[in-house]
Image (cartoon, grey):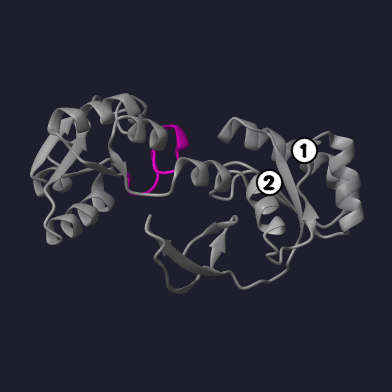
């Protein structure tokens, strides 16, 4: 039995696929989503709180309680909400529930651009030249950017969605952009940590999705062109 810890089209797709594979499904919903299609599609449904996502879909304890109540064997987080929360993955594992997604260690590593880039460099993966050091003082960041050479891209280490990113083409504006990127990153993700990379102008953004299971089987699911972006956020994915 699979509990789908999400809502809307995301949850509906996961529920449809799980049922096609022969699994019983459990939906969770806020009070505002009581009549939502994903709730109707599931075999069982549990209300996990009021409309505010912080009191429902982002509340790990309520979702784990719903899983225990319904006897769910696994939790599929969909994407967004708790899908990239390593603490939630760990909590599910401790509760004896399979988390359908990356391990907590992988989520934690890839949730930090700084740590994930260090891991890629150590693995010998070619990376864009930049700075991913632990020293986050303004002076060190400015020197690193000048050493890399304009133009550079400042990036929030945490989070995504284009937040905390600044393209710097003029060295005289570095101080301003560092402060701005750090402030936005801190407000959006709770961390002002930044990395710096040499800016690649007019690039093509190609992604290849890789899927692996706990038994060592690995496949790639084809490439997708995500070059069309607005404010560093993918428009077509």
Tell me the number on the disc at residue 5: none
Position in image of residue 132 (x %, y %): 75, 47
In the rendered image, which quarter contains the C terminus? bottom left
- The CA span between labels 1 and 2 is 8 Å
Residue drawn at x 48%, y 62% as measured from the top left: 235
In the rendered image, which quarter contains the N terminus? top left
Residue bearing mark 1? 134
Q: Is residue 220 left or right of residue 139?
A: left
Q: Which of 59 and 133 is in front in this view?
A: 133
Position in image of residue 197 (x %, y %): 76, 56
Residue drawn at x 58%, y 50% as measured from the top left: 162
Residue range corresponding to the magenta coloring: 77-87
Assess whether residue 80 is covered by the magenta stretch: yes
Dominant SS of magenta comes to loop
Residue 201 appears in the figure: yes
Q: In this view, does 90 lie to the left or right of 232?
A: left
Residue bearing mark 2? 114
SS class, disc 2: helix
SS class, disc 1: loop
Residue 237 appears in the figure: no
Assess whether residue 72 is covered by the magenta stretch: no
Residue drawn at x 11%, y 57% as measured from the top left: 22
Circles 1, 2 touching at the beta carbon (< 8 Å): yes
- Around disc 2, counting alpha carbons within 10 Å, would you say few (fewer than 14), some (14 to 19), or many (20 or more)? many
Position in image of residue 105 (x %, y %): 51, 42
Residue drawn at x 71%, y 58% as measured from the top left: 121
Q: Which of 152 and 20 is in front in this view?
A: 20
Position in image of residue 192 (x %, y %): 68, 34
Q: In this view, does 86 lie above or below 22?
A: above
């Amino acid at each position: 039995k699979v509990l789908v810890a999400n809502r809307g089209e995301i949850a509906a797709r996961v529920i449809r696929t799980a049922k096609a594979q022969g699994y019983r499904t459990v939906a969770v919903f806020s009070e505002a989503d009581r009549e939502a299609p994903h709730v109707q599609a599931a075999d069982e449904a549990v209300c996990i709180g009021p409309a505010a996502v912080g009191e429902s879909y982002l509340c790990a304890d309520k979702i784990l309680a719903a899983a225990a109540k319904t006897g769910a064997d696994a939790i599929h987080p969909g994407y967004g909400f708790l899908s990239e929360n390593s603490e939630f993955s760990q909590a599910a594992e401790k509760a004896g529930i399979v988390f359908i997604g990356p391990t907590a260690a992988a989520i934690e590593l890839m949730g930090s651009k700084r740590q994930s880039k260090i891991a890629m460099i150590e693995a010998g993966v070619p990376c864009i030249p930049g700075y991913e050091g632990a020293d986050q003082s303004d002076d060190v960041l400015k020197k690193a950017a000048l050493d890399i050479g304009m133009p550079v891209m400042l990036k929030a280490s945490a989070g995504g969605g284009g937040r905390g990113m600044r393209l710097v083409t003029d060295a005289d504006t570095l101080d301003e952009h560092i402060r701005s990127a750090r402030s936005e990153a801190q407000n959006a993700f709770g961390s002002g940590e930044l990395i710096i990379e040499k800016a690649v102008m007019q690039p093509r953004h190609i992604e290849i999705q890789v899927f692996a299971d706990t038994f060592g089987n690995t496949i790639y699911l084809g490439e997708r062109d995500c070059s069309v972006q607005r404010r560093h956020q993918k428009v077509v994915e």
